[in-house]
Image (spheres, helix red, strand yellow):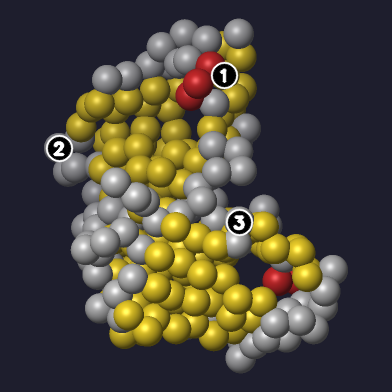
Amino acid sequence: RKEVEQDPGPFNVPEGATVAFNCTYSNSASQSFFWYRQDCRKEPKLLMSVYSSGNEDGRFTAQLNRASQYISLLIRDSKLSDSATYLCVVDAWGNLIFGKGTKLSVKP
Amino acid sequence: DAGVIQSPRHEVTEMGQEVTLRCKPISGHNSLFWYRQTMMRGLELLIYFNNNVPIDDSGMPEDRFSAKMPNASFSTLKIQPSEPRDSAVYFCASSFGPLQTQYFGPGTRLTVL
């Protein structure tokens, strides 16, 4: 089983849509969780950390489900500028492990 | 504030040549990471340093790859000899600790012909 798994997509959605990504992880002892965003031919950048109680940052909501070992990212009212690849990041055995990412394409 | 600085941004070389990638982490960060990204394998951790000491190099593909961090503000990743399968984007990242938020440099796009 891979340490961090994501649906690669692509998710093609119209502007204004709500879209959700899930990510599963294998290490039940993981404590740190993040979502990163990577634009085409750019470096990954932190989008938001994921806290146990769930957290929201504007149109973005992150949730953690420890029992099922997955984290999710919800984007509401999607914008053209949200088009990017979203990377799930989880700590495992002393390192941060990056998922391969889910590609989102928001269309006019 | 300056972010993570990498050089060169692009490198095209021929098989068998030595390649050296350079990284300057964010001042004050104690951890430095080297990653390789390809379409097939995604973002792979090659090696990371904590307080200039290599902690985990299990991701280094083979003896052709070596990394050094002579001081807190500079690190190099060297490939000798380079092979076409080494073609990828190499990112350097730094953070306050191994499990803290990592900040990435712009990457070096390496092409080995």
Disc 3 on helix, strand or loop?
A: loop
Residue B90 as seen in the image, left or right of residue A58: right
Residue A33 on image: x %, y %: 29, 50
Which image quadrant is residue A64 in?
top left
State the residue position of label 3: B9
Q: Nearer the viewer, mark 2 or mark 1?
A: 1
For the residue carrying disc 3, how many other residues have a C-alpha within 10 Å: few (<14), some (14-19), or many (20+)? some
Farthest bottom residue?
B63
Q: Are marks 2 and 1 on the same chain?
A: yes
For marks 3 and 2, give the CA distance.
40 Å
- The mark found on residue B91 in the picture is none
Nearer-the-camera pick, B62 or A97: B62
Q: Chain of mark 3?
A: B
Amino acid marked by disc 2: Ser
State the residue position of label 2: A53
- Residue located 40% across and 65% down the image: B24
Nearer-the-camera pick, A39 or A6: A39
For the residue carrying disc 2, how many other residues have a C-alpha within 10 Å: few (<14), some (14-19), or many (20+)? few
For the residue carrying disc 1, how many other residues have a C-alpha within 10 Å: few (<14), some (14-19), or many (20+)? some
Disc 2 on helix, strand or loop?
A: loop
Nearer-the-camera pick, A94 or B100: B100
- The mark found on residue A106 in the picture is 1
For marks 2 and 1, give the CA distance.
29 Å
Contact, CB < 8 Å: mark 3 with mark 2? Answer: no
Amino acid marked by disc 3: Arg
Query: In the figure, A6 relative to B110: above or below?
Result: above
